[in-house]
Amino acid sequence: MRDPLDRIIIFDTTLRDGEQSPGATLNKDEKLTIARQLARLGVDVIEAGFPFASPGDFEAVQTIAEQVGTPDGPTICGLARATGADIKAAGEALEPAAHKRIHTFIATSDIHLEYKLRKSRDEVLAIAPEMVAYAKTFTDDVEFSPEDAGRSDPEFLYRVLEAVIDAGATTVNIPDTVGYTTPTEFGALIGGIEENVRNIDKAIISVHGHNDLGLAVANFLEAVKNGARQLECTINGIGERAGNAALEELVMALHVRRQYFNPFLGRPAESEEPLTNINTREIYKTSRLVSNLTGMFVQPNKAIVGANAFAHESGIHQDGVLKNKLTYEIMDAQSIGVNENQIVLGKHSGRNAFKTRLKELGFELSENELNKAFLNFKKFADRKKEITDWDLESIVNDQIQQPPELYKLELAQVSCGDRLRPTATVTLRTPDGEERTEVALGTGPVDAVYKAIHQIIDLPSELIEYTVQSVTAGIDALGEVTVRLRHEGRVFSGHAANTDVIVASAHAYVNALNRLYGAMQSPSFSAQAEPSVTSRV
């Protein structure tokens, strides 16, 4: 029998479900960088990937298990369908971790049974406990998910959960796979499981939910009130379709409103003890890192981490905040790691000061990465009088997320104006070392640059997104550019930052094309897009 938990376990699936966002594919090094930051953030469980999906995913999970899954680190989890091959791959990939978990799943809703699995209820009732028992041969920590639980028949769901708990499942996760339920319904579903599953006291109830109706966070908070003690979420809420419940929103809701939630966890209402193990001061930095590495910008009005989350334009609001922040702010920006004084370094700062500040910001770079980042810092410092923490984060994130430099931008030069046809001259170094220069006209300077690049890198692709965002205020602010290209149904993203937005645009486009070019050279390129191994929990 488990002891009642008086805190919430945070299960982060940014590296698994979050990576399923179109265009958010991460390589092994990028996954490792995010995993290290998630450990600093204080998440309890990192779902590092789906080992059976591809050799690359297997290697990424294994690397994270080795380097982040230390004895004092988080539990490292791998996803597996309820099949022997999937579970075996997960068990082998997770082997190096001090604390490891296999998360296996099979659908339980009638619509999934009929149209996807083509199996009967009795077949699923036999498969689920058998595969949980097999997973137990690799680790004692096994999680089971009845996919599409939100649309499953409750009585059948209870039977499946009882069977998998008897087989050894230590966590049972209840996914609202398609984001269909409302808070009242989802809370009642969790409450029904607490009341009707005979052996539920032997497992932790977890929840996983998608945001198709914008209700994921509300559903989770209602689930907490009804007995859920693990929340499966992602940084910035990224994930399939409309995304997942956002980690930062859940954690800060539980933090700011802990006096409301305390009684539901058996605590005195006035208790000031945190309800999660999250270091909230790492939230903003983690959000920025994930945004930069995935190329998925955070909308300005996004709760907690959006650029406008602590901004005030209304005169009435400004007057109130100046008198007392509590008039219009329910939390302090510093509580999520946003410092009011961002000015840190300038062009006269040395390498040691640069390295020290990066370490304070939580970046651990190799000597090679540090050298490259310092050179970029010096270039930016020559153009900007003062370099802020935000600038530093952008410089470093831009450095560590670069794809292999197959094509290298050597020159990007444009001429444009109200009486000129935008013209771009671009020079690229090709993978074989040749320098090629092309000139092109466009409807604007960026269009001209991209046409010139395309004349050199002639890869079949469609530009589906181009976004620019200022990192800081001022005429000399760094501009971050993200582009997304589509090729045969797959999306490739590129990202770059520069004080010259045209240069940043050129670098971002070349980065995306490098990702596409590199993928096309891989013999497993077609296999990696195989839909049969895509998870939908």
Image (cartoon, rainbow, N blue to C red):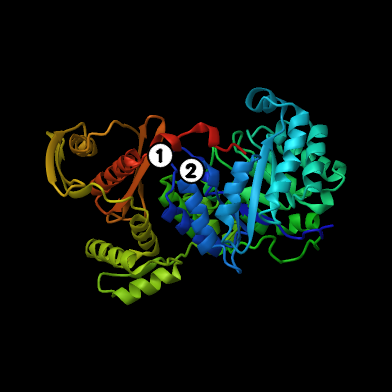
Three-letter residue code for mark 2:
Ser
- Label pair 1/2, CB-CB below 8 angstroms: yes
Position of 150 with respect to 346 (left or right) is right
Find residue 46 and report its horizontal and vertical position in percent.
58, 55
Residue 76, horizontal then vertical, whole percent: 59, 57
- Asked which quadrant contains residue 278, the reply is bottom right
Image quarter hosting the C terminus:
top right
* Horizontal arrangement in the rendering, residue 218 relative to residue 528 (left or right): right
- Quadrant occupied by the N terminus: bottom right
The answer to whether 347 appears left or right of 424 in the picture is: right
Q: Is residue 289 visible?
A: yes
Judging depth in this view, the residue of 130 and 35 nearest the camera is 130
Residue to which mark 2 is pinned: 54
Whole-angstrom CA distance, mark 1 to mark 2, is 9 Å
Other residues around mark 2 within 10 Å, as few (<14) / some (14–19) / many (≥20): some
Residue 414 in the image: x percent, y percent? 15, 43
In this rendering, the answer to whether 290 lies above or below 82 is below
Q: Amino acid at mark 1?
A: Ser
At x 63%, y 26%, the residue is 116
Secondary structure of the residue carrying numbered label 2: loop
Q: Residues within 10 Å of mark 1 (few under 14, many from 20)?
A: few
Tell me the residue that label 1 is attached to. Answer: 524
Residue drawn at (27%, 48%) of the image: 504
**Taking 335 as reference, is 355 above or below it?**
below
In the image, 220 versus 306, the foreground residue is: 220
Q: Nearer the viewer, residue 170 or 442?
A: 170
For label 1, the SS is loop
